[in-house]
Image (spheres, rainbow, N blue to C red):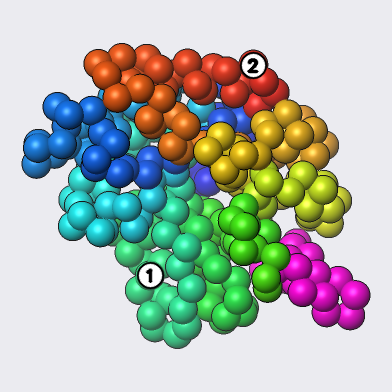
């Protein structure tokens, strides 16, 4: 099953548009995980076990693991999800962006090394830097379009022939880069009008929407702006608000509660 089909099935099965980001910050983990050699994996495993039936995807963050030298634990949680909950797609949030052989090896790392179902990629080096990822026809390439951070407007909203750069990215994604029907776009929840504009440009292409919760984006506004023609099409991503809902023994239960509240607030299908 390819990434798009897996995502479609997850929406249908769970009636949820929530994607949980696995962005570990060791000092924020419950104390019992902080001195364990497999602490990150054990923490994420508990979160996944508590939420797998009410999410449409997981999004482990590469740098949060790499900075701790925890490559094995990153691989382990992806493998655990694939083995225990094989119907839940996994997006490696690595924000890759390079050229030539380097791009080829970055794609190989994501898809053959970590065996991710999809990976986030910057489009700003252009077509030849994207193709090493999109040629994996059964995997997803999630391109940064209009991100959720405060500085996103510095470049992404610059006008070219009267159109912002992020809309140029959306247009290329819809018309040139999606030959294998495996491209998605990142559009931040902090700008609902942008979500609506991008949706109008790309049709039913999936959108990964970070920025709710800790970054201040509103779930209901993002969903209202971004649903596709089938009432789905969104992966509303939350990380810190889910992972660190509690630092006590009830952390996994609290994480599930945050996801359930997001669904009740509109991240449903």
Q: Residue furthest bottom?
A: 100
Between 89 and 157, the one nearer to me in the picture: 157
Q: Is residue 122 left or right of residue 65?
A: right
The image shows residue 218, relative to residue 121, as above or below, that is above
Q: Is residue 208 left or right of residue 75?
A: right
In primary-sequence order, the first of circles 2 and 1 is: 1
Between 246 and 222, the one nearer to me in the picture: 246
Q: Residue at x 38, y 31 (%)?
A: 243
Q: Secondary structure at mark 1?
A: helix
Residue 68: in magenta span: no
Residue 174: in magenta span: yes
- Residue 79 percent coordinates (x, y): 28, 41
The image shows residue 207, relative to residue 11, as above or below, that is below
Q: Is residue 57 left or right of residue 166?
A: left
Residue 232 appears in the picture as rendered:
no
Name the quadrant containing residue 231.
Answer: top right
Q: Residue at x 64, y 63 (%)?
A: 152
- Residue 52 percent coordinates (x, y): 42, 24
Q: What segment carries the magenta color?
A: 156-179
Between 194 and 136, the one nearer to me in the picture: 194
Residue 264 appears in the picture as rendered:
yes
The image shows residue 234, relative to residue 129, as above or below, that is above
Q: Residue at x 57, y 18 (%)?
A: 261
The image shows residue 61, relative to residue 16, as above or below, that is below
- Residue 20 percent coordinates (x, y): 47, 35
Image quarter (top left, top right, bottom left or bottom right) of the C terminus:
top right
Q: Residue 264 bears which disc, if any?
A: 2
* Residue bearing mark 1: 106
Q: Nearer the viewer, mark 2 or mark 1?
A: 2
């Amino acid at each position: 099953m390819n990434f798009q089909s897996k995502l479609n099935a997850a929406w249908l099965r769970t009636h949820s548009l929530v994607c949980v980001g696995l962005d570990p910050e060791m000092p924020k983990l419950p104390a019992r995980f902080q001195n364990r050699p497999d602490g990150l994996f054990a923490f994420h495993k508990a979160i996944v076990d508590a939420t797998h039936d009410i999410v449409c995807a997981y999004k482990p963050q590469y740098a949060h693991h790499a900075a701790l030298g925890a490559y094995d634990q990153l691989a382990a949680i992806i493998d655990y999800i694939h083995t225990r909950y094989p119907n839940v797609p996994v997006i490696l949030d690595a924000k890759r962006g390079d050229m030539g052989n380097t791009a080829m090896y970055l794609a190989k790392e994501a898809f053959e090394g970590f065996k991710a179902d999809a990976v986030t990629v910057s489009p700003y080096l252009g077509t030849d830097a994207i193709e090493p990822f999109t040629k994996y026809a059964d995997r997803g390439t999630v391109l940064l379009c209009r991100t959720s951070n405060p500085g996103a407007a510095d470049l992404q909203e610059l006008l070219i022939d009267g159109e912002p750069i992020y809309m140029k990215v959306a247009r290329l994604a819809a018309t040139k880069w999606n030959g294998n029907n495996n491209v998605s776009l990142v559009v931040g929840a902090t700008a609902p009008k942008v979500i609506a504009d991008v949706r109008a440009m790309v049709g039913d292409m999936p959108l990964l929407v970070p920025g709710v919760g800790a970054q201040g984006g509103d779930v209901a506004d993002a969903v209202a702006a971004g649903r596709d023609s089938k009432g789905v099409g969104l992966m509303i991503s939350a990380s810190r608000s889910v992972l660190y809902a509690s630092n006590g023994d009830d952390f996994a239960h609290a994480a599930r509660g945050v996801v359930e509240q997001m669904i009740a607030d509109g991240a449903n299908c």
